[in-house]
Image (cartoon, coloured by chain):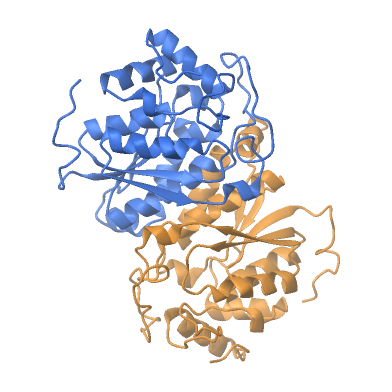
Chain colours: A blue, B orange
Amino acid sequence: MDLPASHAIDPLARPAVVLLSGGLDSAVTLAWMVSRGFRCVALSFDYGQRHRHELACAARVAAATGAVEHRVARIDLGAFGGSALTAAVPVPKDRDVEHAHDIPVTYVPARNAVFLTMAMGLAETLHARDLAIGVNALDYSGYPDCRPEFVQAFERLANLGTKAGVEAAARGEAWFRVHAPLQTMTKAQIVRLGAQLRVDFGLTSSCYDPAPDGRPCGHCDACLLRAKGFAEAGARDPVTR
Amino acid sequence: MDLPASHAIDPLARPAVVLLSGGLDSAVTLAWMVSRGFRCVALSFDYGQRHRHELACAARVAAATGAVEHRVARIDLGAFGGSALTAAVPVPKDRDVEHAHDIPVTYVPARNAVFLTMAMGLAETLHARDLAIGVNALDYSGYPDCRPEFVQAFERLANLGTKAGVEAAARGEAWFRVHAPLQTMTKAQIVRLGAQLRVDFGLTSSCYDPAPDGRPCGHCDACLLRAKGFAEAGARDPVTR
């Protein structure tokens, strides 16, 4: 699928804030929003994650995928501890990710809620009404803040808790819409959509526990799910160990 | 009203996270939660506010009011601009606060949503199910994120979007409860409640635009509402210009 060439540069396109971690899912989400004609501001967070390599990836993905701007906001999630992604808890390796349906220790308390509320605040100052997040079917089998009902509850909160939302409600409209285009997709479907949208997978980083040079560990849940997704899509992952 | 002496030191009391700005409303909210027997962790934010003096006040209020701990989390709300409290927009002075029902320029996009989601994340790591916020009737005539429907929508989001919420739902329970004890109170009623709870008003700071030494400007909305509240309660404000 060819992307309309005008999108990344059309100053009149509808603005959107897209959460971008630098991983596969958010890269495909950004590409999807760009392909739908949004003028996308990508938003990443420096939240004390141990896989900070993803922030460098996010910057490269934002530029390559046609975001008009990339912002990084610092927040103190690490101060709360409680997750293998921010605290001194080991990242689990070689789990049976296909059959694990517990909430993993890589769950970060309140992460998506904080990310979405920050995106909502940025959107309000940009007069944007569209937000996008790359949550998907695999995530929501494990992470409560990736489930469709969470995304819907957030949309409701955003429309009640903002000046833009209240002013739109007075006109009988809903202001914010949260796009979650991957919501029902498997990793293989996401890889196929990304290929269609010409996402440069080589720029993305999914690993929870990469080497100092950014190379993936190959054994954490994120690496295993990514490998499985590429295998099932019959595609080669340019990011290898 | 005497506070039960045991509350601040009972290690078995139910933990709660109380949002504490260092102003009058959050100080009274903290005192109320302590008086109800909660073991309160006070949470403040360094969000690039121009009235950073309030953070020093928050630390003193937390200690004097019986919080077991005071945490300050840094977040980048200022990076988004858009408010007189964080950006280079003048703080309005000498407004007719009694009859102003527009959303003031001191509104910070997404502020309470971000604060509550951060409180929710901290609560989850502390195994606390109670959150408290000092929103009240005066605020919610102006700020959308102080309205009861916002607080209710947030409670719903918290119970859907967290591991603790999902696990409690599986047992047929709601995990998080957001306490907003001042929700229907006027400023005068808040002053009276604070006096009953023996809040040391002299430690609090309400001004949006204080002098470098912390003295209030006396003319911003927050100063005018505070003065009106003390006057109507027939009480003397120990914090004067």
The answer to whether B177 is drawn above or below residue A85 in the figure is: below
Closer to us: A20 or B169: A20
Q: Position of residue B132 (x, y in %)?
A: 62, 59
Q: Where is residue B111 in the image (x, y as percent from the top left)?
A: 46, 59
- Residue B83 visible here: yes
Q: Is residue A122 left or right of residue A108?
A: left
Closer to us: B128 or B191: B128
Closer to us: B215 or A141: B215
In which quadrant of the rendered image does the N terminus of chain B lie? bottom right
Residue A56, quarter of picture? top left
Q: Where is residue A230 in the image (x, y as percent from the top left)?
A: 42, 13
The answer to whether B41 is drawn above or below residue B165 in the figure is: below
Residue visible at 52% across and 24% down in the picture? A216
Q: Is residue B182 left or right of residue B210?
A: right
Residue visible at 41% across and 26% down in the picture? A24
Residue B54, quarter of picture? bottom right
Residue visible at 56% across and 85% down in the picture? B213
Q: In this view, does A31 lie to the left or right of B60?
A: left
The answer to whether B195 is drawn above or below residue A224 in the figure is: below
Q: In this view, does B59 lie to the left or right of A230?
A: right
Q: Position of residue B6 (x, y in %)?
A: 86, 65
Closer to us: A117 or A167: A117
- Residue A20 visible here: no
The answer to whether A29 is drawn above or below residue B106 in the figure is: above
